[in-house]
Image: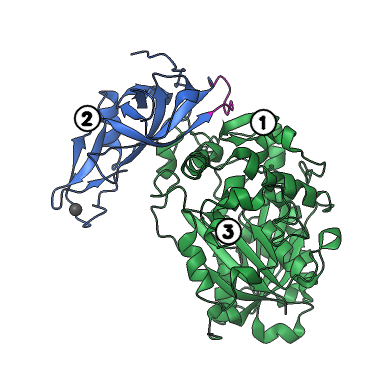
């Protein structure tokens, strides 16, 4: 899906995928955002570390985040850090009211980069990133309240 | 209060630096040996007195070209010394002298030297610009795996959201905080070793290109080549030293989530470290004569101005506006060597510590702050934080 305001995000550095992060990147390739939820206390943990940040249980499972997110903060990058990197683009740090303690960093689409705003609502999404990986790419739903 | 504090059993005895510049055509090892030799001489010691060695970063770990220089084994071999204590410092080492102070306070070493050598100026020139963080590795590992693939390719992009949130929550203006780089540039004009010494105006600042909003060019430190070495000695040896400086208090507390994007509150950074540091001394913020606060990016100095209580939360804009309070003759002269913004990215608090020592000794040349007896030093903030008060002997 190409949404206005997006730039090609495939130029960059791909992630090193580990035992802990494989579920995230696999789900990302299917367009789904997953975080860890504790089997014992139901708390959310992200990034996945194989241990519940709340009760230290080692029994965690991946659950999908489907609700809207809210921009905690953002930046607009103008610098061409790598040859062929398309700029500018907005990077948003997003929180999810339904998943306390979870923050995910991603690109922002659906608006001009300069229209990014704190507290604005976004929809979960992904787009093609470096090395064939799908990366988080949130879609702006409207101006900040 | 507590003269049993560990840091009271240690002193900073010497500081030394190599030639510093945007491009120095000598190896990292040679720059390191220049700095160590100068620091040991500055302490009033000889190389044979040194029995502790430490460097940052430990293991030569690098995410940027030119980041890690002066291999610990090669340096020890060149110096031809026996060590009883060594340390490869890691991110989160608080301040450069923190580990060495622990070593000399506990008798593991008597005189320890710690160094940080950068060749990032040459590396940036060679790459045709400041390179992407982690670009020397084919894949983004560990915490960087969540940042680099989405395009947060530099520490600038990783720190910028802190500035965005700060400006948003407190209604502070960029043209207010601009006075930090502008004033530090005026200080750098009086420092012959600074990288940038020409005056910087408010118009130039506001007209400069944006790197990663709201961080513009002049909010970023300048990649440099150079080495800084610091000698830390047991206070028992104070009588043998040329001009020791006391470590009145030091602390490094990490109480939030230790990753750039995860820290719970982007507008309150370094508070736990500052609070722990102040709990170790009877001195108060109003006693501080000169402040050397980390400024890899300008916003980091803002964090420490507020966390250490030099002004209230959200008031740094008013505090620095116009530059009078942070000038050499102001109530809190800030980064009197130019800081990393103009003096050069000597990194990890090494340049800041060297300047604090020089100011407290009255050896800061044209930029000397009159009657400087108490200095504040701080490093980074967030997932790696250190703060200290140093005082004259
Ligand atoms: Zn749990």
Quadrant for the N terminus of chain A in the image: top left
Residue A29 in view (yes/no): yes
In the rendered structure, the answer to whether residue B313 lies left or right of residue B9 reads left
User: Residue visible at 55% across and 75% down?
Assistant: B102
- Chain depicted in green: B
Disc 1 residue crowd, few under 14, some 14–19, many 20+, Cα 10 Å: some
- Chain depicted in blue: A
Look at the numbered disc 2 and give the secondary structure of its residue: loop
Distance from label 2 to label 3 (Cα)? 42 Å
Residue B311: image tag: 3
Q: Chain of mark 2?
A: A
Toward the viewer: B205 or B313? B313
Q: Which residue is label 2 attached to?
A: A66
Quadrant for the C terminus of chain A in the image: top left
User: Residue visible at 49% across and 43% down?
Assistant: B162
Distance from label 1 to label 2 (Cα)? 40 Å
Look at the numbered disc 1 and give the secondary structure of its residue: loop
Q: Is residue A42 above or below residue B125?
A: below
State which region is magenta. A77-85
Residue B332: image location, x then y, percent: 69, 61
Look at the numbered disc 3 and give the secondary structure of its residue: loop
Q: Nearer the viewer, mark 2 or mark 3?
A: 3
Is residue B229 in the magenta section? Answer: no
Residue B129: image tag: 1
């Amino acid at each position: 899906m190409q949404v206005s305001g997006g730039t090609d995000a495939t130029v960059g550095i791909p992630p090193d995928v580990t035992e802990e992060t494989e579920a995230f990147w696999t789900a990302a390739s299917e367009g789904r955002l997953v975080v860890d939820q504790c089997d014992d206390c139901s708390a959310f943990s992200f990034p996945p570390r194989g241990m519940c940040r709340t009760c230290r249980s080692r029994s965690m499972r991946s659950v999908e985040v489907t609700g809207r997110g809210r921009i905690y903060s953002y930046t607009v990058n103008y610098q061409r850090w790598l040859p062929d990197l398309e700029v500018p683009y907005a990077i948003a740090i997003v929180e999810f009211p339904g998943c306390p303690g979870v923050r995910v960093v991603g690109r922002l689409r659906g608006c001009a980069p300069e229209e990014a705003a704190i507290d604005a609502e976004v929809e979960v999404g992904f787009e093609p990133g470096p090395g064939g990986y799908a990366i988080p790419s949130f879609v702006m739903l409207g101006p900040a309240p | 209060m507590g003269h049993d504090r560990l840091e009271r059993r240690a002193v900073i005895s010497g500081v030394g630096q190599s030639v510093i510049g945007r491009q120095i055509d000598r190896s990292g090892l040679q720059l390191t040996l220049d700095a160590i030799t100068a620091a040991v001489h500055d302490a009033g010691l000889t190389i044979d007195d040194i029995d502790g060695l430490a460097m940052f970063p430990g293991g030569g770990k690098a995410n940027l070209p030119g980041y890690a220089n002066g291999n610990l084994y090669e340096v020890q071999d060149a110096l031809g010394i026996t060590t009883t204590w060594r340390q490869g410092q890691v991110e989160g080492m608080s301040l450069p002298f923190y580990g060495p102070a622990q070593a000399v306070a506990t008798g593991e070493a008597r005189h320890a030297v710690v160094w940080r050598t950068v060749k990032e100026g040459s590396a940036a020139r060679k790459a045709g610009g400041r390179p992407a963080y982690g670009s020397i590795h084919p894949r983004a590992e560990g915490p960087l795996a969540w940042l680099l693939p989405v395009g947060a390719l530099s520490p600038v992009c990783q720190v910028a959201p802190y500035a965005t949130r700060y400006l948003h929550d407190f209604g502070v203006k960029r043209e207010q905080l601009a006075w930090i780089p502008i004033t530090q540039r005026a200080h750098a004009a009086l420092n012959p070793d600074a990288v940038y010494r020409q005056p910087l105006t408010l118009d130039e600042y506001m007209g400069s290109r944006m790197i990663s909003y709201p961080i513009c060019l002049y909010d970023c430190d300048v990649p440099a080549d150079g080495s800084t070495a610091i000698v830390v000695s047991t206070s028992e040896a104070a009588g043998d030293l040329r001009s020791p400086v006391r470590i009145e208090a030091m602390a490094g507390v990490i109480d939030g989530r230790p990753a750039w994007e995860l820290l719970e509150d982007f507008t309150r950074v370094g508070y736990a470290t500052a609070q722990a540091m102040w709990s170790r001394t009877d001195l108060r913020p109003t006693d501080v004569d000169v402040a050397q606060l980390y400024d890899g990016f300008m916003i980091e100095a803002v964090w420490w101005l507020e966390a250490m209580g030099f002004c209230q939360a959200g008031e740094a804009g008013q505090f620095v506006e116009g530059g009078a309070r942070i000038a050499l003759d102001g109530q809190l002269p800030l980064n009197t060597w130019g800081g990393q913004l103009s003096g050069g990215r000597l990194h990890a608090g090494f340049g800041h510590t060297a300047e604090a020592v020089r100011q407290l000794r009255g050896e800061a040349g044209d930029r000397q702050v009159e009657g400087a007896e108490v200095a504040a030093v701080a490093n980074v903030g967030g997932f790696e934080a250190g703060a200290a008060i140093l005082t004259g002997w």
